[in-house]
Image (cartoon, grey):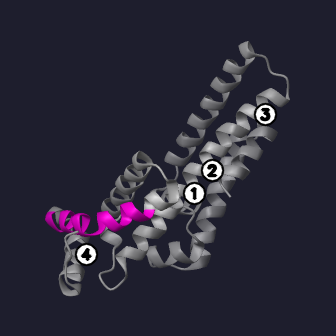
Amino acid sequence: MHAISGETYSADIQALASGDVAAFERLYRSLEPKLYAFALKLVRHREDAEEIVQEVFMKVWERRSQLDPNHNLDGYLFTTAKHLVYNKARRHAYEFAFSQYLSTHGIVAENATQNLLEHQELAQLFEEACAAMPPIRRQVFAMSRTEGLSNQEIATALNTSNSNIENHINKALKVLRQKFKHYDIVYFWGLVCAFLLR
């Protein structure tokens, strides 16, 4: 591990917030080993832990302009890693639940492919609906529903109020409900959304 002093650490976070690639690389070299060890304890597989680490640092880079040199970057890294592990586990659970749904409802193999295609089409529509949201609403929605951050965590990160965050989330959900209300499998999709977006 390439340890860095507290003063250099804060300076590097500040530089990273301005897009300094060298600062990002120094922070990566310093923090990657302990983040990898942490992720490995959560997922128990080397490849999965490496993937988590890469995703966490990608998010750090994407959100570099929002970093606060006075806040603990380690805590942010570990929290983000935990959310990623949780979301991956939830996706695996959903895939299992979908296969169980097909089996429970007696859907034969030839129809299973069609149902999977319908699901993929709906997932694509969901992605498109999210992409059409105003940038800040899309960001708030992703932080809440994809990363699992609380309204308070999002409000702090974006320097705004809880009520503003709630407003964005409610409007995002309203758009999604409107988008899918006419589909025949809306009940099943509603269950999926409730599971994925809680």
- Residue pointed to by mark 4: 13
Q: Label 3 to label 4, Cα distance in Å?
A: 47 Å
Whole-percent x, y for residue 99 in the image: 72, 31
Q: Nearer the viewer, residue 96 or 153?
A: 96
Magenta-drawn stretch contains 82? no
Query: Does the CB distance between marks 3 and 2 fall below 8 Å?
Result: no
Asked if one can make out residue 106 in the rendered structure from this viewpoint, the answer is: yes
The amino acid pointed to by label 4 is: Ile
Marks 2/4: CA distance?
Answer: 32 Å
Residue at the spot of label 3: 101
CB contact under 8 Å: marks 3 and 4: no
Nearer-N-terminus badge (3/2): 2
Which mark is nearer the camera, 3 or 4? 3
Question: Rounded to the nearest whole Å, what is the CA distance between mark 3 and mark 1?
Answer: 22 Å
Q: Which residues are magenta?
A: 22-38
Name the quadrant containing residue 24. bottom left
User: Spatial distance from mark 4 to mark 1, Cα to Cα?
Assistant: 27 Å
What secondary structure is marked by label 3? helix
Q: Left or right: 22 with respect to 97?
A: left
